[in-house]
Amino acid sequence: MKINLRKSAALQLEIMNVMNNIEVSTKRSYADIDYVETDFHDHVSTWKNNLNRKWQLVDTLENIRKATAKANQDSGVSDLLTKERVITQKIKFLTEVLEYRNTRMYTVQEITDKLKKYQEIKSDSVLAFRQEQSVISSLISKEEISVYETEIRKLKKLRQKTNDQILELNVSTLIDLSESDVRFLEKEELI
């Protein structure tokens, strides 16, 4: 049976969900003497069967992941995913640089003049507590802001194009499931 990479990802999630919901409890509390023998043997059998089921699920999951990893590498999806993550990091970095873009940028002379003025006010004890004693200035110019905003827009377009390519490959690239994995997944009602 062949499935595409998109279905493979969904199937892997389903398998993990099923595994997480299978209980393998090796502990049981007893209060009624009449049911101990039957209950004990039933629960031993249940946890052993559940462990075996989980084991088969994880083996099937491994087979699917190996086939998916190979297909991702062969089709170029792995490289595109790396490219998308790099683009996302660059957008994040530039967004951080632009965090204070709305803060006024003072010249060095303006900052110096303001600080001198604050020092003069400081000598007057009444006004000293009413005035701000520091100058907050942006360190990025309007021109730089414009350049970085343009770069972010370009990067976002490139990321969208890359994501579209990934989606196309995820739909068009197929992997083979072994007959035994298919039978097991059908038995588990996952396909």
Image (cartoon, grey):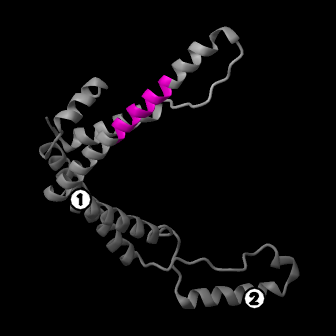
Image coordinates of residue 141 in percent, x first then y, are 43, 79
In the visual, does 112 lie left or right of 151? right
Seen from the viewer's position, the closer of residues 41 and 170 is: 41
Residue at 13% in and 35% down: 1
Element type at mark 1:
helix
Label 2 CA crowd tier, 10 Å (few <14, some 14–19, many 20+): few
Label disc, if present, on residue 191 of the rendered structure: none
Residue 5: image quadrant is top left
* Residue 27 seen from this side: yes
In the visual, does 95 lie left or right of 31? left
Amino acid at the residue labelled 2: Gln
Amino acid at the residue labelled 1: Ser
Seen from the viewer's position, the closer of residues 117 and 99 is: 99
Residue 82 part of the magenta-drawn span: no
Image coordinates of residue 29 in percent, x first then y, are 67, 23
Residue at 36% in and 41% down: 58
Label 1 CA crowd tier, 10 Å (few <14, some 14–19, many 20+): some
Q: Nearer the viewer, mark 1 or mark 2?
A: 1
Seen from the viewer's position, the closer of residues 138 and 97 is: 97
Residue matched to label 1? 78
Image coordinates of residue 178 in percent, x first then y, are 17, 38
* Residue 22 seen from this side: no
Residue at 24% in and 41% down: 8
Residue matched to label 2? 119
Per the rendered image, the range of residues in magenta is 45-58
- Residue at the outermost front position: 37
Residue at 39% in and 69% down: 94
Q: In the rendered view, tell whether residue 149 sits above or below residue 62.
A: below
Element type at mark 2:
helix
Q: Earlier in the sequence, mark 1 or mark 2?
A: 1
- Residue at the outermost top position: 34
Image coordinates of residue 51 in percent, x first then y, are 44, 33
